[in-house]
Amino acid sequence: MSTQDKRKPGQGQVETTGHLWDSDLAELNNPLPRWWLWGFYATIVFALVYWLLYPAWPIGDSFTKGIASVTYEVDGEERTTHWNTRALLARDMQFGDHAVRQREMLEQVSAQDYETILADADSMSFVNAYAQGSFGTWCAACHQVGGAGVVGLYPNLTNDHWKWGGSVDQIEHTIREGRLGYMPDYRNTLTGDQLDAVAAYVLSLNDYEMDADMVDAGQRIYQGMDGGCFQCHGADGGGLASQGAPNLTNNLWGLIDIRGAESDEARLRMVADLVHDGVQREMPGFSDRLSDDEIRMLTAYVHSLGGGQ
């Protein structure tokens, strides 16, 4: 049973609310601490201010936008929109301390010639940090993250054997304009025996033990008008960078895994099939997707991977 017996506190007693059960079970009247109440009121004020400033409440298929705004640039023109994390990120990437410092370094390094960039540790440190992202975005899908490429598909950028040349000017031209690698097929030009003979000759240039008669026959085809291989790859097989014709004497084969073959016969078959089928590979140019400064940074970065000449 509950009765109303509100007792005032005496010495050492606490005020009750007046509710009493079983004569001695009372509900005490302990007010909340004043600091807690003020803190609670502050959270209410904070919520009201937040709802006013920032996106908060859903309304149908939209929401309240708030009065806070963010200004950033789009294609060189200022754009102001309601506060949101995407706009905030865009502004920070354009005007944040890191972005400003990055632009300053980009302008500084871009004003240097390649010789200075490659010789200066601070410049190359920036190049590696900046261009690594560009390489990952535009190049790694084919050439892999470390630039090692994929045998049979995409060239290795970490060695010093370049089909189109590995100087900074040649690398920049490759990135800017792209490359079209082409070797005609000989399926209707050479017989099966002639294809094997040419393959034997090319393999002999890499110190593989091949049949001497086949090598002699292959050399005549290679250096004669039947094959005409010398016109692109050179009489000695050293290649021709202006044509993108690879060196055939260094035992580095980007389109076929010669060194991974199980036997010389398998190597002979690989080379003969390659000559039979021909080659057509294209790398797109990036002059319409990357700025001049980005291309310069990417050029220096690719050169530094280990393949630059």
Image: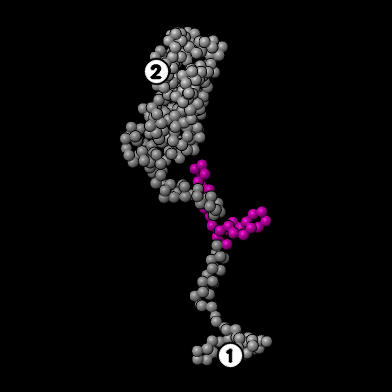
Residue 289 seen in render: no
Image quarter of the N terminus = bottom right
Q: Which residues are magenta?
A: 51-80
For residue 57, side relative to residue 211 (left or right): right
Task: Indicate the quadrant containing the C terminus: top left, top right, bottom left or bottom right.
Answer: top left
Q: Secondary structure at mark 1?
A: loop
Q: What mark, if any, has residue 184 been given in the picture?
A: none
* Foreground residue among 76 and 226: 226
Q: Position of residue 128 (x, y in %)?
A: 39, 39
Q: Give the quadrant of residue 112.
A: top left
Q: Tell me which label, 2 or 1, sits earlier in the chain.
A: 1
Please, what is the three-letter code of the amino acid marked with disc 1? Arg
Q: Nearer the viewer, residue 300 or 81?
A: 300
* Image coordinates for residue 86, horizontal then vertical, percent: 53, 50
Residue 206 appears in the rendering: yes
3D distance between C-alphas at marks 2 and 1: 110 Å
The structure's colour scheme is: one colour
At 45% across and 49% down in the image, what residue appears? 95
Residue of label 2? 207
Residue located at (39% from left, 14% from top): 236
Which disc number belongs to residue 7?
A: 1
- Residue type at mark 2 is Asp
x, y (%) of residue 226?
A: 49, 8
Q: Nearer the viewer, residue 244 or 272?
A: 272
Disc 1 packing (10 Å; few <14; some 14–19; many ≥20)? some
111 or 300: which is nearer to us?
300
Badge 2 density bin: few <14, some 14–19, many ≥20, Cα 10 Å = few
